[in-house]
Image: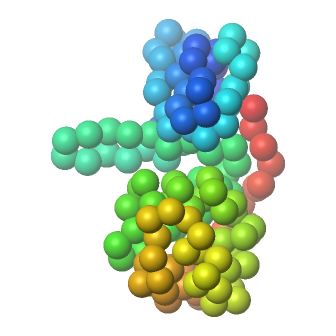
């Protein structure tokens, strides 16, 4: 499974990025930031493999990647919803919302209702602090 990609940015539009590694392979990754084409960049990646598809979601820090993967363990939360949460709210705001039982903060994200927010708080309430042990250092 792929966890980190480093190489030359061939394309970036704020929704996805294509990074060519030194082996010549270009990886297409969902990434919510614009990177300078032609520059070198590193992206933490969560590689999702399903029966009919493979997708990669990119993150600027290991902490964001680990929170995304933790959100995937919540019943009813898929990769798109989890990615939307992490990129729209941010790691610290999600940790605070779960810790303080703030469903209204989580429902600010398009497509996430009260039921989904309640499930996130229920499932992650006692393990959300584990995310803090991972580095929040930015890689670019």
Seen in the image, is 30 located left or right of residue 126?
A: left
Q: Is residue 16 above or below residue 96?
A: above
Q: Is residue 126 visible?
A: yes
Res. 33 image quadrant? top right
State the count of labels.
Answer: 0
Res. 35 image quadrant? top right
Q: Which residue, as the protein is rendered here, is positioned at the far right?
A: 137
Q: Is residue 72 visible?
A: no
Foreground: 13 or 130?
13
Q: Is residue 42 above or below residue 25?
A: below
Foreground: 102 or 46?
102
Q: For the point 48% across and 17% down, which residue is it?
A: 26
- Quadrant containing the N terminus in the rendered view: top left
Q: For the point 42% across and 84% down, which residue is it?
A: 115
Instruction: State the image coordinates of residue 96 (x, y, percent, origin top left).
Output: 73, 78
Q: Is residue 37 above or below residue 44?
A: above
Seen in the image, is 118 located left or right of residue 132?
A: left
- Quadrant containing the C terminus in the rendered view: top right
Q: For the point 69% across and 43% down, which residue is it?
A: 60
* Display coloring: rainbow
Instruction: State the image coordinates of residue 18 (x, y, percent, origin top left).
Output: 53, 22
Q: For the point 72% across and 70% down, which residue is it?
A: 93
Instruction: State the image coordinates of residue 22 (x, y, percent, origin top left).
Output: 58, 12
Q: Is residue 99 above or below residue 54?
A: below
Instruction: State the image coordinates of residue 130 (x, y, percent, origin top left).
Output: 66, 74
Foreground: 61 or 22?
61
């Amino acid at each position: 499974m792929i966890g980190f990609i480093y190489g030359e940015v061939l394309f970036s539009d704020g929704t996805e990025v294509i990074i060519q590694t030194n082996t010549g392979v270009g990886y297409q990754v969902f990434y919510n930031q614009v990177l300078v084409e032609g520059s070198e960049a590193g992206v933490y990646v969560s590689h999702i493999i399903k029966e009919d598809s493979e997708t990669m979601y990119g993150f600027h820090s290991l902490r964001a990647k680990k929170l995304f993967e933790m959100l995937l363990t919540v019943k009813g939360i898929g990769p798109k919803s989890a990615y939307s949460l992490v990129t729209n709210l941010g790691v610290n705001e999600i940790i605070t919302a779960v810790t303080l039982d703030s469903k209204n903060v989580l429902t600010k994200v398009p497509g996430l209702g009260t039921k989904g927010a309640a499930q996130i708080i229920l499932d992650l309430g006692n393990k959300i602090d584990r995310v803090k042990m991972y580095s929040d250092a930015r890689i670019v």
